[in-house]
Amino acid sequence: MAQFETNPKGQYFGEEFDHDEGKKHGEKCIKVPEVIGRNSCQTLVECVIPFPEQYPAIEIKDIQKQIRDLIVHVCKNKVLINGILHKNINYKTYEGNSDYYCCYQKYDSYYGDVRHVAVNIPFACFIEIPGACPGDDYQIEYADVEDTCEIDILEDPCPSKGPVKEYRRLREKVIIKIDLKVLRDVQITVKPEKCNICP
């Protein structure tokens, strides 16, 4: 039998215990998580990301986004959340242009490299969950960027020096969504069912 502590009222605390000496013999008291509530929040994150001065962008190739380092505090009726939005931006640059011919037809072309910029952007939000209390546990069910709703705008064009426009900055707006539930351990008494074991 497991070891337990009792308070002055004689209540038992622990993962499980047996009521000995004829008191509901065979019953066990166990702790199970009870869902106090669940809810979600959405927060708009807007940022301006500069490109290296010597490598302005002509086009965004792709942007990889990831939610990192979530810090959660359960308060009275609310849950406070802080985190980091990590972005890895792959973009095309312009280095020069050349002419080429195909079937006696002249075509303009330009070339360059694909480079990347990585940034960490802090964000914060809160979720209302009636009944939540400090000390309650929590479980994050979903935390990600809503890819169906985002805006990417190249800004601050460089003085023209070739056939394409180059830009010094990227302005991006994204929506972060977080689904979370608050849990609290409660004690319940269960009576194990007897099983017939075949020989």
Image: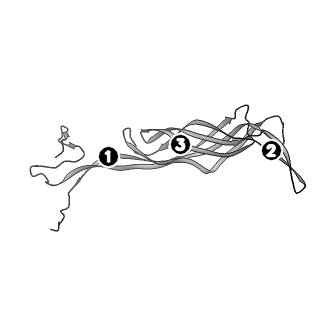
Mark 3 is on which residue type? Ile
**Lower sequence index among marks 1 and 3:** 3
Left or right for 162, reference 193? right
Mark 2 is on which residue type? Tyr
- Distance CA(mark 2)–CA(mark 3): 36 Å
Q: Nearer the viewer, mark 2 or mark 3?
A: 2
Report helix, strand or loop for mark 2.
Answer: strand
Q: Nearer the viewer, mark 2 or mark 1?
A: 2
Q: Which residue is mark 3?
A: 67
> Which color scheme does this rendered protein use?
one colour
- Distance CA(mark 1)–CA(mark 3): 28 Å
Q: Residue furthest bottom?
A: 198
In the foreground, 144 or 88: 88
Mark 1 is on which residue type? Asp
Image spot of residue 110 (x, y percent): 80, 44
Report helix, strand or loop for mark 3.
Answer: strand
Q: How many marks?
A: 3
Q: Which residue is mark 1?
A: 185
Report helix, strand or loop for mark 1.
Answer: strand
Image spot of residue 194 (x, y percent): 18, 62
Image spot of residue 195 (x, y percent): 19, 64
Q: Which residue is mark 2?
A: 110
Q: Residue furthest left?
A: 21
